[in-house]
Image: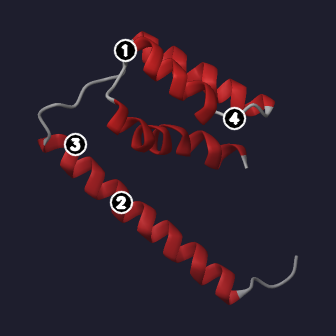
Amino acid sequence: MGSVNPIKLGLLAAIMLAGAVMGIVWYRSRRTAQDVRMPSAGEVVVGFGTEFFDTLGIGSFAPTTPIFKLFGMLPDELIPGTLIVGHTAGVCCSR
């Protein structure tokens, strides 16, 4: 094994630190929020199905948007943010 590039190591450390800080802030804000709930079975099925489509190369945003609209799962204003937050973990893990 070769030596580790110090710039790359520093960038990875900064990303990990930012992720940890964001996770802590999210956890603390979630404890004080009143309207937090677990996803329903239908929402889990939509997420699993669309992430499976993403694995096949179809994408996850394209099928999720019409499903949200067809079943009225959330207001149109919340769809873009929900797509970004909801599909981030799957996309990061698959790359």
Q: Earlier in the sequence, mark 2 or mark 1?
A: 2
| Left or right: 11 in relation to 68 | right
Give amino acid for label 4: Gly
Q: Quadrant of residue 11?
A: bottom right
Residue, disc 4: 59
Local SS, label 2:
helix
Residue ID at (86%, 81%): 2
Per the model, the C-alpha gap separating discs 2 and 3 is 12 Å
**Residue corresponding to mark 3:** 30
Secondary structure under the numbered disc 4 in the rendered image: loop
Instruction: Answer above or below: position of 81 versus 23.
Output: above
| Secondary structure found at label 3 | helix
What residue is at 55 percent from the left and 26 percent from the top?
A: 64
Number of dots carrying numbers: 4
Q: Which mark is residue 22?
A: 2
Locate residue 88, reporting x and y percent: 54, 45
Give the left or right position of residue 60, taking residue 21 as reference.
Answer: right
Give the colour scheme shown. Answer: secondary structure
Q: Counting other residues with Cα less than 10 Å from the Cα at mark 3, is it few (<14), some (14-19), or many (20 or more)?
A: few
